[in-house]
Amino acid sequence: KRSFESKCVNNNITIKDNLIKLPKLKWVKAKVTQNINGRILNATVSKTPTSKYFVSMCCEVDIKQLEESNKYIGIDLGLKDFAICSNGSIFNNPKWLRKANYRLKLEQRRLSKMKKFSNNWNKQRIKVAKI
């Protein structure tokens, strides 16, 4: 209910510039983020709760084996600092989670007070999904 996922298994899937050809839908405008090298096996069209559509493609590609190296590094994950590496580099801990949880709590509270399936409820539901 309220979820959308469709799988296309066909040899009829092609990509040209900013267009994707899918069976039954023909050519669809898309924002292509990666070049696809190899044969496309299938495509899955999915819809997020924020009403955005995504196409993920499974491809058959020949992969070159990487060269072996003797370089190693140790990583220590912590609370004060996000990560400390054995070579001395330190990554700071992002503290955005507490603020995001507070915002989510407020928006969910607003959503719970609205009449279900109304237009305002639907707009608020999308706000909560984005958070």
Image (tube, rainbow, N blue to C red):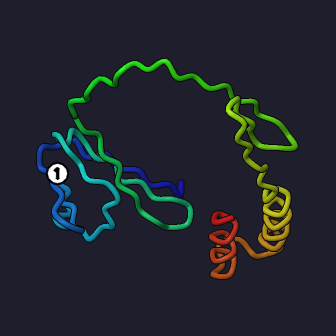
Q: Residue at x 78, y 76 (%)?
A: 114
Quadrant of res 113: bottom right
Q: Is residue 55 left or right of residue 39?
A: right
Image location of residue 88, percent across then percent down: 72, 36
What amino acid is found at the position of numbered circle 1 in the picture? Ile
Q: Residue at x 30, y 67 (%)?
A: 30
Image location of residue 102, percent across then percent down: 86, 63
Q: Residue at x 82, y 36 (%)?
A: 78
Image location of residue 57, percent across then percent down: 30, 46
Furthest-left residue in view?
Answer: 12
Mark 1 nearby-residue class (10 Å; few <14, some 14–19, many ≥20): some
Closest to the observer, 82 or 41: 82
Q: Residue at x 18, y 67 (%)?
A: 27
Residue 81 lies, with reference to residue 75, above or below; the image says: below
Residue that label 1 marks: 13
Quarter holding the C terminus? bottom right
Closest to the observer, 77 or 36: 77
Quadrant of res 110: bottom right
